Image: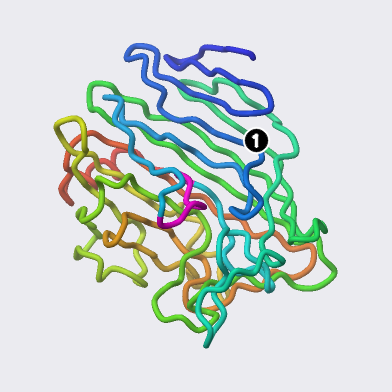
Amino acid sequence: MSEASAGGLRIVHTHGERIAIAEVSTGVDLLTYVYRPEAAWESPKPYLHPLRTLAGDVVTGYRPNDHRWHKGLQMTASHLSGQNLWGGNTYVHGKGYLELPERVGSMAHVTFEKVAGEGSGALIAERLTWHPYDGELWAEEERRVEVHDVDPGAGSWALTWSSAVTNRREEPLRLGSPTTAGREMAGYTGLFWRGPRAFRGGRVIGPDSEGPGLMGRQAPWLAYSAEHDGSDGHATLVFAHAPENDHSGAGGAHPAHWFVRNEPFAAVAPSPAFFDELVLAPGDTLARRYRVVVAEGAWERDDIVKYLAEHPW
């Protein structure tokens, strides 16, 4: 185990297992990054859980009984050239979800390039590899998880998740979703957040409208607000795209659409392959950057817009 402090944050690395980042003045572990391998059926991959508000309230779910492979905030690939780097059953058009363990792959931790304080925040820089069920190397990923803008007075903090995935096959990698495979409005893949059970029925807020009808829409940000069990009050999570994401799709169009549910559970994902497959040629790299703001209280649209304006990329 190793420990370091910087900029009001404490970083504790339990080697081979996890990294916890805490805010020193409150003593709250804001996040835990778990990278030890877990059950093969759940598509082993690193994940963030728990995420907490500065008040200490948990805002992620872990291995819920409806989807054991939902683990906090994690990078996923539900349909990847016929493989499932998501976990659990695989959607097959005309047959529904089938138990196909031979399609369940993994994302493996290779090494950390840096785990340290950076300015007033903290950085986890990691290299990973993506594999189908048989273990072949399909992709390499460079990942950065940054904690920043920690403000105990305002009751908010933010993380930025960056992923650059390079195709190492000799043929294209096809990133898809259950919707690209034939299931309507189930375009989940990519960075995926699962909320705690108490967040069921929460409020979904977009720049111009609100509600679960934002499923499949495009927007620069989307927020989810809900009330805790076990303690009084609400929390709001704001999910936002980096500006450069807007210019990464075919023909310069943004390929991402929001996957969002508040029933029967809370979930948000900026899906890069909701309606159409995203094809990555051999040797090409798909880079994406996202921000997640974790705030105490039930923020309104004006609060979100003001925060984002005051905290530019």
Q: Quadrant of residue 58?
A: top left
* Front residue of this view, candidates 152 and 44: 44
Q: Position of residue 294 (x, y in %)?
A: 32, 37
Q: Quadrant of residue 285?
A: bottom right
In the image, is residue 158 above or below residue 265? Answer: above
Coloring scheme of the render? Answer: rainbow
Q: Is residue 191 left or right of residue 65?
A: right
Residue type at the position of mark 1: Arg
Q: Residue at x 44, y 37 (%)?
A: 159
Q: Position of residue 183 (x, y in %)?
A: 46, 81
For the stretch drawn in magenta, what is the main secondary structure? loop
Question: What span is in magenta?
Answer: 66-73
Q: Residue at x 59, y 61 (%)?
A: 77
Q: Is residue 68 magenta?
A: yes
- Count of numbered badges drawn on the protein: 1
Q: Which residue is mark 1?
A: 36
Secondary element at image label 1: loop
Q: Residue at x 60, y 42 (%)?
A: 46
In the image, is residue 91 above or below residue 121? Answer: below
Q: Position of residue 232 (x, y in %)?
A: 14, 31
* Front residue of this view, candidates 9 and 261: 261
For disc 1, the neighbor class at 10 Å (few under 14, some 14 to 19, many from 20) is: some
Quadrant of the drawing holding the N terminus: top right
Q: Position of residue 101 (x, y in %)?
A: 67, 64
Q: Residue at x 60, y 72 (%)?
A: 278
Quadrant of the drawing holding the C terminus: top left
* Front residue of this view, candidates 72 and 295: 72
In the image, is residue 136 above or below residue 47? Answer: below
Q: Residue furthest right?
A: 170
